[in-house]
Amino acid sequence: MGEAAIGDIVKAHYHSGTYIGTVREDRGANYLIEVLAVLKHPLQGDLHNYGKLEGVFFHERKALAFHEKMNVKKAAVHPFDGEVPAYGASLQQAVEDYRKKLGTDESEFNRQSLLKLNNLEENHYKKLY
């Protein structure tokens, strides 16, 4: 992306998730972005050893919360020109999309990822839908 202005609505990739947000500050090489919606749920597992289960810590990663701030490299920020969905509905759709993706391959890694995702949904997300 070129330059974004304070207040612009953007799409930002952050820690394996993708979000819609508002630019709040220009921090030199980064933008401070306030989360408005979730486009892609963060991946589960060890991102440095993706697809592996043995000898790694299998992380459970929550999506960023509504109005949470993220410090994103400018190269990972792109214009967003659509309608911003409601946070809860966008989170639910992102979880469902990730669940479908995990269901396409019956590997042990995908089963573990699905367990983590289901746990997040039951313990954190359902109250937001």
Image (tube, grey):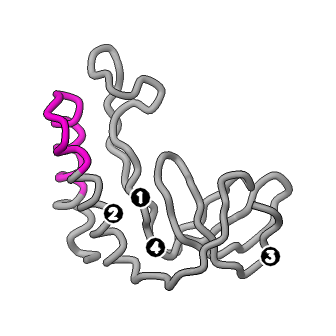
What is the C-alpha distance between the residues marked 2 and 3?
27 Å
Residue 56, placed above or below residue 18: above
Hey, which quadrant is residue 93 in on the image? bottom left
Q: Residue furthest top?
A: 55
Q: Amino acid at mark 2?
A: Ala
Question: Tag 4, which secondary structure?
Answer: strand
Any mark on residue 37, and which? 4
Label 3 residue SS: loop
- Residue 26 against residue 14 in the figure, above or below: below
Residue at which label 3 appears: 5
* Magenta highlight: main SS: helix
**Residue 62 sits above or below residue 9 on the image:** above
Residue under label 1, please give it: 40
Does 87 appear above or below 27?
Answer: below
- Of callouts 2 and 1, which one flags the residue occurring earlier in the amino acid sequence? 1
Between disc 4 and disc 2, whose residue precedes?
4
- Residue 15 locus on image (x, y percent): 52, 47
The quarter of the rendered structure image containing the C terminus is: bottom left
Q: Which amino acid, by three-letter code, is at mark 3?
A: Ala
Q: Is residue 18 left or right of residue 103?
A: right
Residue 85 x, y percent position in the rendering: 42, 82
Marks 1 and 4, how far apart in space? 10 Å
